[in-house]
Amino acid sequence: MRAIITFHSIDESGSVISYPPRQLAALLESLQAAKLPVVDLDTLLAPSTQHGVALTFDDGMRSVFTHALPVLRDYAAPAHLFLTTGMVGGQVRWKTLPGNAPTFVMLGWDDVEKLHQAGVRIEGHTDSHPDMRELSKGAIAAECERADRMIEQRLGRKPQYFAYPFGYRDTRATDYARDRYRASVTTSLGELKGGEDLAALPRLDSYYLRARWLLRRLDGKLPRTYLALRGLLRRLRGRD
């Protein structure tokens, strides 16, 4: 298996974008047992890499600092955080979530800096988390440049990777991301098979990585077939 895994909040709320801390530990334990290394995106996307998993966290919920970081440290696992800079220090409840979803407290800049110091790589996710399909070329550039500039000013490092807000993209957004970033990730559900467009890489959503039977044999034929079928169903429903 060679894949990028998507997380958002690490908490016990049970929301569709929440993943419990104990399950994050169980997932990393499973990856170790399957001899699947957890690596950064540079390593995962290198032509010589045949097996491995990269961990990515979207948006910038504060639980990434309070709940995910201790687990990542326990397993010496690298990770990338796609940060929505305009939401730093605030609270968010995305319009795409079900009505019973909680409001999420976001990271403050002190938290972001501590994550960076701990080795979590802070990447681009725009400034205001818009639907990029609704933006002009100039507005797409402004969103990304504003976010990247803020991250570079705060951390001394310019983002190398990008995640499309909500996974929404069109040709203009993809072309811009291709020119600006080393690679960009989507919400398309799937493993990396080789030959993918680096500006539109699929990921495995952690929502589908909760069942014990799946975690016990994550690299096995049955779990991978299950994930492939989930990806196919999502595409048929027009969710990617």
Image (cartoon, helix red, strand yellow):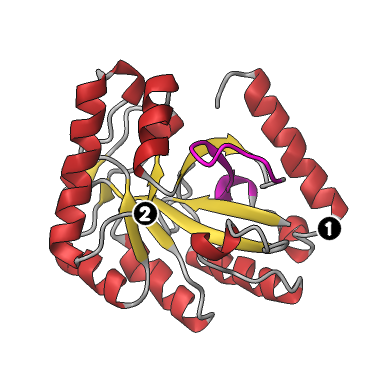
From what the image shows, is residue 134 above or below residue 212? above
With 179 as the anchor, is 37 left or right in this view? right
Mark 2 burial class by Cα count in 10 Å: few <14, some 14-19, many 20+: some
Task: Say whether disc 2 or disc 1 marks the residue closer to the N-terminus.
Answer: 2
- For numbered disc 2, what is the local secondary structure? loop
Q: Considering the image in quadrants, where does the C terminus appear? A: top right
- For numbered disc 1, what is the local secondary structure? loop
First to last magenta residue range? 194-208
Name which residue lies at 76% across and 71% down.
Answer: 34
Q: Position of residue 99 (x, y in %)?
A: 38, 29
Query: Residue 87 sits in which quadrant?
Result: top left
Query: What number is the disc on residue 220?
Result: 1
Q: Amino acid at mark 1?
A: Gly
Q: Amino acid at mark 2?
A: Gln
- Taking depth in this image into account, of 65 and 55 the one nearest to the observer is 55
Name which residue lies at 49% across and 82% down.
Answer: 74
Q: Position of residue 162 (x, y in %)?
A: 38, 45
From what the image shows, is residue 16 above or below residue 238? below
With 115 as the anchor, is 40 left or right in this view? right
Which residue bears the numbered disc 2?
Answer: 160
With 233 as the anchor, is 226 left or right in this view? right
Name which residue lies at 75% across and 39% down.
Answer: 228
Query: Residue 2 sits in which quadrant?
Result: bottom right
Please say whether residue 95 is one of the residues in the magenta stretch: no
